[in-house]
Every structure is written in structure tokens, then in C-alpha cells.
Amino acid sequence: MTALILVVDDVPANVKLLEAKLVGEYYDVITAKDGFEAITQAKKHKPDLILLDVMMPGMDGFTACRKLKEDIEVSHIPVVMVTALNEISDRVNGLEAGADDFITKPINDTALFARVRSLVRIKVLLDELRLREKTGLQMGVLGENENIFASDVSGSHVLVIDDDVVQANRIEETLKENYRVTLVTEVEHAKEEVAKHAPTLDLVIVSTQLMDSDGLRLASQIKNFEELRHVPIVMMVDEDDTPLMLKGLELGINDYLIVPVDTNEMKARVKTQIRRKKYQEALKESYQASVSMAITDQLTGLYNRHYLNAHLQNMVNQAMANRKPLSAMMLDLDHFKSVNDTYGHDVGDEVLVQLSLLIASSTRSADTAARHGGEEFIVLMPETDVVAAYEISERMRTKIEAYPFAISHADKIIHKTISIGFATLKLDGDSAHDLLKRADVALYDAKNSGRNKVLPSLEQIAASQSPSGRMVASGGSRSHPPEDTGF
């Protein structure tokens, strides 16, 4: 995943070294020589991550980080402090200033890129949520939000899994001053306890030093719980077990604590993670509560055409500014008129509702699915190039072809197929209208060339290759029940 990273250091040699490392991994880099310039660059370019040196003249890294986190415009951008200091008190000062993590000089490349990838993943989701909020503001159905990153998170629910009873009790005693704590020391019951408390959890802390269990595996399994997808998980790791810590970050674990746990550092890291979760929730709740009626399709619950047009323009602007790909998928249910003619419009509505659920379950959280009209739907896919768009479209086509659509009053099922056309934004001189137009033409070609297939826009076929070496139109076997023949 590409990203724009701001490197801040007053020593030119350090800047050049970090820049070379990051560019070598295909990240885009901008630089600043002090805290003042860092704030200016962050507000101007909105980077995906800030690598901020601590020891700088004029304004040190701690002060710069604090000012960044106090500014609602840039407070959501992850900050990693880069420092030669290795005292716990320095880490605590940085975390209390709002930093997300620390990297100690000399920099270990593996550790650096693990942290970068982990934090950029979070930033992508926050960007999409903020973009949706911006769309709501433009449509006049949302009000301005306060800076949630500076809000009080006392009373949040933290679950701790650790079979070292002494250590677990010490953690509980420290955290219960500000949080509601659930302690799990019998690890065999950990998953049941997590499932029971899932609706109210704000953070999970898991030891990777469990006696009879693989703590990292348990943490990754918890991360995959549907209800806990956006609940941060902090792992406790041994100071000398860097490979395990890096593996955890690669698996999507949000943060880590070094054992033996320093209580002040734990307080700071817990607060940072919960604040980020609350910020994400506030964006979602504000958006959903205030905008739902104005921007969603009444039948399917997906976004409506009015919202789609406004949001697409914002997505195009963002893709152009960041030089990142954006693809649009347009899909249409094949022979939908036959459903209405045979079973009635009520059944047609049932099929559309089921189809919309299939579409929603087949897209990522950063994607935008909308009903364009009738039986036609659109999915906008940020940071998705033409090859990835083809693969996603084909998976959706296959999934829908195999799905048994239920007809409630007739107690039977029917099978339907879809045709899909898609296009990818040209980053030079393209427009939202032209992007949808190309996807629409590709859909028209898919319908006219036999249906139940995926086609890219014609101008992209020659230039695009699938993983197998070429991009081709695809279609499934026509193994439908007799009553569906001819739909």
C-alpha cells in the first residue's frame, strides 16, 4: 500500500537516510526541518504518517506532536517519534503528547516498515470516514464535530487476558482508576469472555507469554471477531522478542506493551488507542444518525444516487491529489423484468434487498456501495487499480450467481446473475462523469455480449493484465433451475 510520509528532522543526513529507506519501499516522502515546518507541511499535504524527530531546536518533537493533536484538521494523522532517547519516561512523554509509537535510533528497517504498514492501514479507514463526513457537511445534513482526540475516555471498558495472576492484578489495579476492567486469567475461557463482553469493549490487552496457549494466535483470532473488528488490541511482549512484536503488527494488532509493563507507559498507550477508537466511532455515529434518511435508498439501505454523485466527486478529488487509483464498478441484475412479471413487484423488491446485502458483504469498509436506480448498483473502490477491480468484480459476480434468492410467499428460491462493467480513474485530466460513463459503457457491452460477465472499459482492456497474464471477459455456467430459464 502506497502512502505519503512526512519526515521531520533538523539533521539533513538523517532526513536523507530515512527518505532513501522509505522511497526504496515505494512510499512518497515530504520533509521538514523543524516542528514549525512540520505543522505547516502536515496541514498543507495531509500525509498518511508523520515520522517526527524528538530533539530539534526551536520546537521539539513533543511540542510539535502536541500541537498537531490539538488541531482537528490533522489530529487523526498517526505520529511516530524518532529518537535516540530510550528511557521509558521519554516514551511516556511522547505518548502523552499524542504520539502513536516510538522508533529508537539507529533505526531497524524491519521495525520501521512494520510500524508504517500498521499505522497506514488505520489511516486509510479514518480518511474514508472523514471523507464521508465531509460529504455530509457539503450536503448540509451534518454539523461540525469537536476534536475527539482530545476528549476524556474515562469509564471505557478494557478486557485483560493474562494467566500471570500477579501481573494481571497489577494491570487491573492501575487501569481501574480510570476504566472499567474485566480480567481473564483462565485463558481457556478467554474467547467466551470476549464474546460475552464484545458489545461494550473499547480495548483488549492480551499477553503473548501465556503458559498453555499461543497468545499472539489468540489475539489475531479475537481481531477476526465481527463485533470486535474495530476494537483495538494491545499485545504484551517480552523486551527481547522483537520478531513476535513485528509479527503481531503485521497481523493487525494495534499496539504493544513491553514486559515488564511500565504503568505510566501502559496508561498512555491505552488512552491513545481508546481515543482513536472513540474518534472512529464518533465519525460513524454522527454520519449514520444525521445522514441516514437523506442519503440512503429506502428499499435497499445502500447509499442513494444523490449521495453517490456528491461523494464520487470528493473521491475523485482525493485520488487526483494523492495520485492513487480509484475504480468504479457498475452492475445490473440480468433479466430482472422477468422477476417482476412472473412473481410480482413485491418479490422483485425482495430480490433487490437480498442483492444489496450481497453487495454490501462483498465490499471493504473503505468502499462505497450505492443504488444507482432500478436494479443497477455502483461500487466505488478507492486505492484499487484496474487489475484489483477486475478481481473484486469477478468474485462478486461468482458469489451472486451461486446465491439462492428466496421468495418468501412462494416458499421457493430462484437463481439470478449480474453483469458488471468497471473503469479506473485516469489521474491526468479525468472527471467523475467520465469515470461513470466508461463503467456504464462497459456494463452495456457486458449485457449485450451475453450477460453474467465482467468487462472493463474498452480503452483499459489492452493496457490491463489479470494475474493470469491477460484480462478477459468472464461468465459462469448456466446451471439454473428450469423455472429460471430465460430470466
Image (spheres, rainbow, N blue to C red):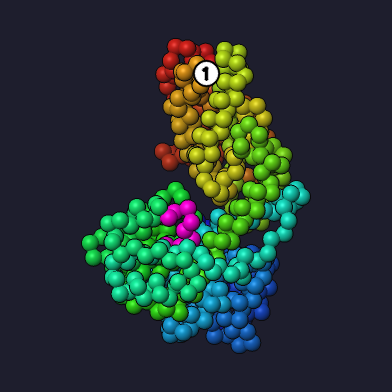
Q: Residue at x 58, y 27 (%)?
A: 352
Q: Quadrant of the C terminus?
A: top right
Q: What secondary structure is found at the residue carrying circle 1?
A: loop
Left or right: residue 172 compared with residue 314: left
Residue 482 counted in the magenta span: no
Q: Residue at x 57, y 12 (%)?
A: 342
Regarding residue 285, the answer to whether it shows in the image is: yes
The vertical placement of 134 against 7, above or below, is above
Residue 100: give x, y in percent of width and height. 51, 70
Residue 54: give x, y in percent of width and height. 54, 82
Left or right: residue 360 compared with residue 402: right
Q: Amino acid at mark 1?
A: His
Res 70 quadrant in image = bottom right
The vertical placement of 32 against 407, above or below, is below
Q: Which sits in the foreground, 302 or 290? A: 290
Residue identifier under label 1: 409
The vertical placement of 485 against 110, above or below, is above
Q: Residues within 10 Å of mark 1 (few under 14, many from 20)?
A: few
Residue 191: give x, y in percent of width and height. 34, 54
Res 244 quadrant in image = bottom left
Q: Which residues are magenta?
A: 197-204
Regarding residue 309, the answer to whether it shows in the image is: no
Q: Which sits in the foreground, 360 or 316? A: 360
> Going by the picture, which residue comes out furthest to the right?
140
Residue 203 counted in the magenta span: yes
Q: Residue at x 66, y 34 (%)?
A: 298
